[in-house]
Amino acid sequence: MIARDDGAAGKEAGGTRHRHPVPPEAAGERLDRFLAALHPDRSRSRIQALVREGLATVDGRPARPGERLRGGELVEIVLPPEPPEDRIEPEPLPLEVLHEDEHLAVLVKPAGVVVHPGAGVREGTLAAAILHRWPETAGVGGPGRPGIVHRLDRGTSGVILVARTAEAHRALQEQFRERTVEKRYAGICWGRPREPSGRIELPVGRDPRSRVKMTTRARGGRPAITLWRVLEEVPGFALVEARILTGRTHQVRVHLAAIGHPLAGDDVYGGRRERSVADPVRRGALRALERPALHALEIAFDHPATGRRMRFRAPWPPDLRDLWTVLGGRLVPGGPAEGQP
């Protein structure tokens, strides 16, 4: 579900007031999630903080971040101006490191963590943690992106590659351009595909009707290819593996949605269908998922210094493991984390 701003916004002391009529299809949605979808330049945690500060109302009354909407209300929020983006400040945040050497590091990004600062998100990023752990990455990859070679969406967990030197960064980016880097994802999607595997070759571009969405129907979309296969099926759902041959924004999410099988928990691409699930336990588990059910399972590349093929795998995360178990699944894709230099 994507809610839309009704266009009514006005400047006032302390910020800009935005008015959002709640559409019927948003019934049952959390207020913070509803507002975060409308204001992607602010993190969900920032939205929650603003609500707690009394800057949001539902039908004129003070609101709570986690309250459920009914549909038909009027939500209003005052968004104060964000300070201009400055250089990244290193932060001593925990990092799960699969591998590190003098040239690069391979990490596991948790769901909910932003890779590098952007509008509305300046603290708690993976980039800040990288800069604290490896200060030499400050000059690698450009301002605000210390050592960042590629990225994962905020809600996607999994394996991510970091360059520690400018030479390694250039070499790894070249591999991405030449499509010699292998990237495999695992996800839980709605429905059971008719075929056990397939190839999706649909262009991906920005949706002209929504600033937060990509689409396969945009004019001028960029070529995108996803290979997928079913790993396990349960009633109403499938555990799928996806290998991407291109690296477009939201590629796996938008491609699976385009063939009628959006990822569970993906409120941008139609993955919030919990009300259609009769079993209360399964329905509750789906509602508890706070992000798209997508995990970057594995990456393989040639080491920029030695040329040796390397492959690393990030373990299936607990939230997706628990959801798949509740839905009736048994398979754990990928097994434990491992590096195979």
Image (cartoon, rainbow, N blue to C red):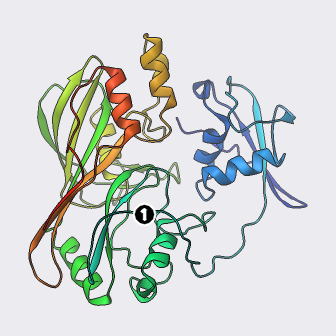
Type of amino acid at the residue the image marks with label 1? Leu
Q: Nearer the viewer, residue 27 or 102?
A: 102
Label 1: element kind: loop
Give the residue drawn at x 18%, y 28%: 232
* Vertical order, 214 against 278 (above or below): below
Q: Local crowd at mark 1 within 10 Å, few (<14), some, or many (≥20)?
A: some
Question: How far across and how far down the image is residue 72, in percent?
Answer: 71, 25
Q: Nearer the viewer, residue 152 or 164?
A: 164
Question: How far across and how far down the image is residue 131, in percent?
Answer: 47, 78
Residue 80 sits in quarter: bottom right
Residue 141 sits in quarter: bottom left
Give the residue drawn at x 68%, y 32%: 22
Residue 277 sits in quarter: top left
233 displayed left or right of 165: left
Question: How far across and how far down the image is residue 168, in percent?
Answer: 25, 84
Number of disc labels = 1
Residue 168 visible from this viewpoint: yes
Quarter holding the C terminus is: bottom left
Give the residue drawn at x 67%, y 25%: 71
Residue 273 visible from this viewpoint: no
Give the residue drawn at x 43%, y 10%: 278
In the orientation shown, which residue stands out farthest toward the top?
278
Q: Nearer the viewer, residue 199 or 280?
A: 280
In the orientation shown, which residue stands out farthest toward the right?
13
Question: How far across and how far down the image is residue 326, in percent?
Answer: 36, 22
* Residue denoted by label 1: 95
* Vertical order, 113 against 165 (above or below): above
62 displayed left or right of 300: right
